[in-house]
Image (tube, rainbow, N blue to C red):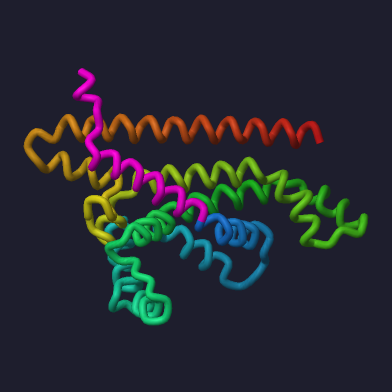
Amino acid sequence: MTDWLTLSPEEWTAVRLSLIVATTAMLASLPLGLALGLLLARGRFWGKSLLDAVIHMPLILPPVVTGYLLLIGFGRRGPIGEFLYDWFGIVLSFRWTGAALACAVMGFPLMVRAIRLSIEAVDRKLESAAGTLGASPIWVFLVVTLPLCLPGIIAGMILCFAKAMGEFGATITFVSNIPGETQTLPTAIYTFTQVPGGDAGAMRLTLISIAISVAALFLSELMARIVGRRIAVE
């Protein structure tokens, strides 16, 4: 029984790589996600609906299509990929950093939507009151808006992380399924299902995926409650 539950070094590598990729995707998406969430929530400009549609496009397109577009744009021969390689020596295709990019693109719409809804729920009267006391718009955002929408930001981060942990189509299309380099939990599970006798490995990694997802949800709820209590006290 214990042998069945013991992970091989390759499986541990897939687990570790998935956590690194998902965390990188989440943290890299946060600054832009916060900026676009604020822009969509408070901005009034021509093309707002178009921008919103472009942001949510990865949720509508098949993940394989998104991965293929990333390969065209960020591959070694793509316009962006060639620029990054020639000027900075950065290669994204068939690298774990490319997997993080693919996961970030797929999870980004969920983060932006959660942040946008949380900002829209903030009472504008509180911001106006702070403004009448002489606070600058940036200071109002930092001390009033940001703390009030923090639970939504946390929720968006967890959604992005969870989406990144489960991303398969865009990742395998853009960076393939290279053990030790781009093989994350979903692609490792897929590999196990394609070989005879791989059911045990697939089940082990499936259970780990479920455990990580549940832990992320519990952590999200815990952090949201802690932040909510602090806001209520203040």
Q: Which residue is drawn at the image coordinates 9% and 33% (left, top)?
A: 197
Q: Position of residue 160 (x, y in %)?
A: 47, 48
What residue is rendered at 80% in x and 58% in y? Answer: 139
Confirm whether residue 226 shows in the render. yes
Q: In the current view of this chain or complex, which residue is farthest to the top? A: 1
What secondary structure is the stretch in magenta mostly built from?
helix
Q: Which residues are magenta?
A: 1-27
Picture layout, residue 77 above or below residue 189: below
In this rendering, is residue 81 above or below 215?
below
Image check: 2 left or right of 23? Answer: left
Comparing 48 with 159, the one in front is 159
The question of residue 51 being in magenta is answered with no
Q: Residue furthest front?
A: 9
Quarter where residue 9 is shown: top left
Residue 224 vs residue 143: left or right?
left
> To which quarter of the image does residue 36 belong?
bottom right
Residue 191 point in image, percent of width and height:
17, 45
Answer yes or no: is residue 60 visible: no
Tell me, yes or no, whether the highlighted magenta stretch contains residue 12: yes
In the rendered view of the protein, which quadrant contains the N terminus? Answer: top left
Report the residue at 63% width, 40% height from top. 151
In percent of width and height, residue 136 lies at 84, 62
Q: Residue at left 29%, top 50%?
A: 168
How many numbered badges does the structure rendering display?
0
> 139 or 38, which is in the foreground?
139
